[in-house]
Image (cartoon, rainbow, N blue to C red):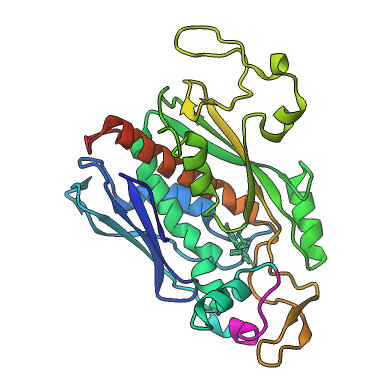
Amino acid sequence: MNSIGAVFRVEIFGESHGGCVGVLIDGCPPGIALSGSDFTADMARRRGGGKGSTPRREEDRPEISSGVFEGRTTGAPVLLTIANSQSDPSAYEDLRYTPRPGHADIAAWLKYGGFNDYRGGGHFSGRLTAGLVAAGVVAKKIIAPAEVKAVIEEAGGSREIERAVEAARKDGDSVGGIVTCVAKGVPAGLGEPFFDSVESAIAHAVFSIPAVKGIEFGAGFSSARMRGSECNDPIKDRGGATEKNDAGGILGGITNGNEVVFRAAFKPTPSVSKPGRTVDLRTGKQVEISVKGRHDACVAIRGAVVVEAVTAVALADLLLRASGSRVKTGG
Ligand SMILES: Cc1cc2nc3c(=O)[nH]c(=O)nc-3n(C[C@H](O)[C@H](O)[C@H](O)COP(=O)(O)O)c2cc1C
């Protein structure tokens, strides 16, 4: 459904062109210092406006509507709302009956019988990730001194990211990308066997990000082509430190004290002006479609900070589960 987590529970809401997007966080430990300025840096990383990204520029300033008193979390649910100040639903009227290939439009129409908010993908829009980034800011404080960092390492199969994105944009097209994420300082022993392994918890969170189509931990798919002697990470000490980290810091679904490392694959942005084919839902006939409006040519660029945020959310939940109570941590 729209919530994730067992103890640190994040519930997401909003639509691209509705009044707002945001998150409700339950299970947030008391005593964490939290103010509006804490969100500025990460929200700016997610916001559009850079090369190859959507020209939709919104302030993206989360309003802390509950759960914080005198600058600290109280232990009550934290409600973070982000206004949609620049929505332009008129741009989507043409798309009401012509679902964009590759977007969630057709799946949402089929699932909700046409009652879904179709404007800009409604609840399935990348805009919803603003709430995830806001939740990530809180989660990062909980997991401190552990730190999560995600960066885009390639776009369109090339490490020359700007060039690849620009070339696609000029063609009225888009490209995908790969984001690498590293979590440092994660204590050994996180992860709950059998079904709530660290891989499962992180993958669950990362696959909630629109356009993510793959994830691999450590050597991932390439480990299938290795020999055991090559793949095994030699152990250096009783703390679990290893000479290399092909396991991505996870063994048996549990953190082993090394860095947690994974990569996430983003597909190309579905909305492209290059003509494609869809169906007119009124007639059932196939028609040509060219999507106009404000769209990223590569969502992986803005996706990196979202990967970072949801990873922090997953780790915060595992950490609080391991500590067994809502004790004061981090911040
Ligand atoms: C930060 C971010 C921004 C996005 N912006 C757009 C966009 O401008 N246009 C678009 O068509 N898709 C965009 N997407 C991707 C779609 O939301 C996504 O492809 C769609 O919801 C279908 O989901 P799926 O690709 O996971 O199947 C964005 C995704 C993210 C993470």
Residue 100 located within the stretch drawn in magenta: yes
Q: Where is residue 313 shown, x and y percent of the image?
A: 41, 44
- Please name the residue shown 56% across and 72% down the image: 121
Residue closest to the eye, 322 or 167: 322
- Please name the residue shown 48% across and 21% down the image: 256
Left or right relative to 68: residue 151: right
Q: Where is residue 273 shown, x and y percent of the image?
A: 75, 73
Q: Quadrant of the N terminus?
A: bottom left
Q: Quadrant of ligand 1?
A: bottom right
42 relative to 50, above or below: above
- Please name the residue shown 50% across and 6% down the image: 237
What is the span of residues highlighted in magenta in the rendered image? 91-101
Residue closest to the eye, 281 or 43: 281
Residue closest to the eye, 54 or 89: 89
Residue closest to the eye, 212 or 135: 212
Left or right relative to 311: residue 304: right
**Which residue is the extreme one toward the top?**
237
Left or right relative to 214: residue 34: left
Residue 179 located within the stretch drawn in magenta: no
- Please name the residue shown 24% across and 41% down the image: 29
Query: Quadrant of residue 59 in the image?
Result: bottom left
208 relative to 123, above or below: above
43 relative to 185, above or below: below
Query: Quadrant of residue 140 in the image?
Result: top left
Query: Quadrant of residue 181 in the image?
Result: top right
Left or right relative to 159: residue 216: left
Q: Quadrant of the C terminus?
A: top left
Q: Where is residue 174 shown, x and y percent of the image?
A: 74, 61
Q: Where is residue 281 shown, x and y percent of the image?
A: 66, 87
198 relative to 125, above or below: above
Tally of marks: 0
